[in-house]
Amino acid sequence: MEIEQDIFNRTKRLVGDRVMESIFQKRIILFGVGGVGSWCAESLVRSGIRHLTIVDSDNVSITNVNRQLMATTKTVGKVKVEVLKNRLLEINPNASINARAELYEESNSDQFQLDTFDYIIDAIDSLENKMQLLWHATRTKATVFSSMGAALKMDPTRIKVAEFWKVAGCPLARALRDKFKSKKLKPSKNVTCVYSDELLENLGVIPENDATPAEFHKVAYNGTMAHSVAIFGFTIAGLVMQDIYQKALASAE
């Protein structure tokens, strides 16, 4: 794959041949390619991930344009995962991008074959589906990362990383923990999360014809900016790369 020698020249200079080969081999599945997930996918492929499955049932909306990577005025109405797949293949034509325009939920969880992946990334908005994904994902051999709430954030310096049960100041994390407890379930292993303890208020007026969150299986529609969601997504991608890097070096010792 000659083109990849040029694309990833600078990456290989940083991490070396062994780590680069490990990056090429990893299989990742990413659930949710909205504000957080789309930027995460971009960073993963630019870092050398060849095998990426992206899962999202939504089409691009005009309200996505302010913060989602593949959302432009020209892509409104198109299937999100298909638009993003095309973008990612422009970065690395040799990548294997599996685009699944589906909604992850308990009833179809087996269809995603989670145990075939090295990394599972959760960037889902729906509280119920997020809980189900984390419950199933942590019962596989995969390393699991999750994004907590990225809306109502402005200060990039308050974006942090913590284990799921230690995330503080995030209403989504609190609601998710409560949901696990109400179902008498819990993740079977640690889940590293990206979150922020900042919580601003919505100041804008919501139009009367605005779609309700329930129509799209969302927790809520809150104000969001590109830099906040992008930092969440890039941070998760960075955590994946760091994990691959450390494990590859450790295996060489």
Image (tube, grey):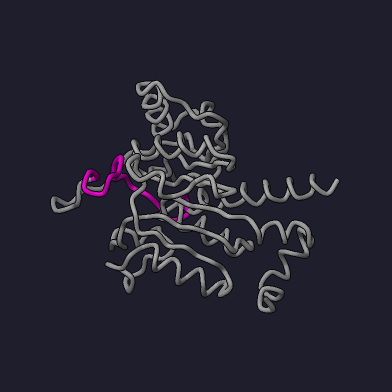
Tell me residue 3's x, y (percent). 66, 78
Examine the rendered structure and indicate whether residue 250 appears above or below residue 59: above
Task: Look at the image and tell me in which quarter the C terminus lies.
Answer: top right
Q: Is residue 22 magenta?
A: no
Examine the rendered structure and indicate whether residue 160 appears above or below residue 175: below
Tell me residue 125's x, y (percent). 36, 44
- Residue 129 lies in quadrant: top left
Residue at (40% x, 35% y) in the render: 131
Instruction: Give 210 or 97, whichever is nearer the viewer.
Output: 97
- Residue 21 lies in quadrant: bottom right
Residue at (39% x, 21% y) in the render: 184
Tell me residue 251's x, y (percent). 79, 46
Residue 188 as seen in the image, left or right of residue 2: left
Instruction: Give 226 or 41, whichever is nearer the viewer.
Output: 41
Magenta stretch, residue numbers: 213-229
Task: Look at the image and tell me in which quarter the N terminus lies.
Answer: bottom right
